[in-house]
Structures are given as structure tokens and as C-alpha cells.
Amino acid sequence: MKKFAAIAAVLALTCAPAFAANQGGFSGPSSTTTTSQAGGFVGPNGTVTTSANAKSMRDDTWVTLRGNIIERISDDLYIFKDASGTVNVDIDHKRWNGLTITPQDVVEIQGEVDKDWNSVEIDVKQIRKVNP
């Protein structure tokens, strides 16, 4: 029984680095490595809007934005920029789906407008790189 426990412990220690491998995320100012998983929303894109228009939309409105993620503010909070301005976007680690994004990459994000008392951000459900 002790041999089995010892073998299981050695196996667990040797496999741990494989599970911690970097699999995508944001690579730019204030970035750290993130991990992701496969899957996510796949469906119609809807109409692409601007960050300025998104700020004036109602809470929980579904939006599609196209532009650049220029900076990481905190763990899941980033600054998204397009021709009309900037808006904060909340991107959970699981939404990256193995993508590595830099500030130079044009991305299309889909998500919901999340309005609080004094702030507006987009809760991102899907992100993908697009050709400019």
C-alpha cells in the first residue's frame, strides 16, 4: 500500500507542470500568463457597434465590438479601444480559448453591456482575432 501511495505522489508531481502550461491570453501592458479551456459561444455576430454607442445602450444589451485590447487593468478587466473611444471589458480566463492577443491585434468581442451606478463595461462572452 505504501508503494502505491509513493508512486501516486511521484506521478502527481511529475504531471503538474504539464497542467500549468500557458495556453493564451492577453500579451501587452500589465499582462500575466493565463490558462484557458476549449468551448464558448458560437452563433450569429449581430451588428458590430462602437464602444461609444455601447456605453449608451441599456444594461444586458448584446453587443459586438471590433478594435484592440490595449491594456490590462486588473485580473479580468481590460481596456478596449476602437475609433470612437475606449470602454472597459471584463474577460474571464476561460473566454480566451487559447488565443494570445497583443495591443496590435484587431479583435472582435461579443458580450453584454454591464451598467453599474457610475460605470459601464462589457462582459465578454466570446473573443476572436480578425484580419484588419
Image: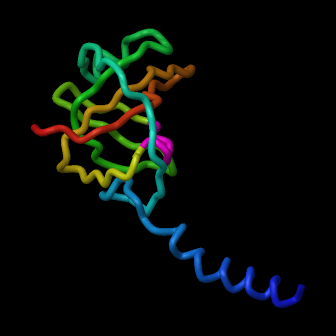
Q: Which residue ends up furthest to the right in the rendered image?
A: 1
In the rendered image, the vertical position of residue 59 relative to residue 41, given as above or below: above
Q: How is the image coloured?
A: rainbow
Q: Residue 62 versus residue 77: which sits nearer the camera?
A: 62
In the rendered image, the vertical position of residue 74 relative to residue 34, given as above or below: above
Identify the image quadrant of residue 27: bottom left
At a point 88% along the width and 89% down the height, the residue shown is 2
Considering the image in quadrants, where does the C terminus appear? top left
Q: Position of residue 104 (x, y in %)?
A: 17, 50
Taking the image as shown, residue 40 lies to the left or right of residue 14, namely: left
Q: Position of residue 75 (x, y in %)?
A: 51, 51
Q: Position of residue 80 (x, y in %)?
A: 31, 37
Taking the image as shown, residue 24 lies to the left or right of residue 50, namely: right
In the rendered image, the vertical position of residue 46 relative to residue 101, given as above or below: above
At a point 78% along the width and 88% down the height, the residue shown is 6
Q: Which residue ends up furthest to the left in the rendered image?
A: 132
Count of numbered circles in the view: 0
Q: Which stretch is magenta?
A: 90-95
In the rendered image, the vertical position of residue 34 relative to residue 19, given as above or below: above
Asked if the magenta segment contains residue 130, the reply would be: no
Considering the image in quadrants, where does the N terminus appear? bottom right
Q: Position of residue 3 (x, y in %)?
A: 82, 90
Q: Residue 113 versus residue 34: which sits nearer the camera?
A: 34
At a point 50% along the width and 42% down the height, the residue shown is 92
Identify the image quadrant of residue 120: top left
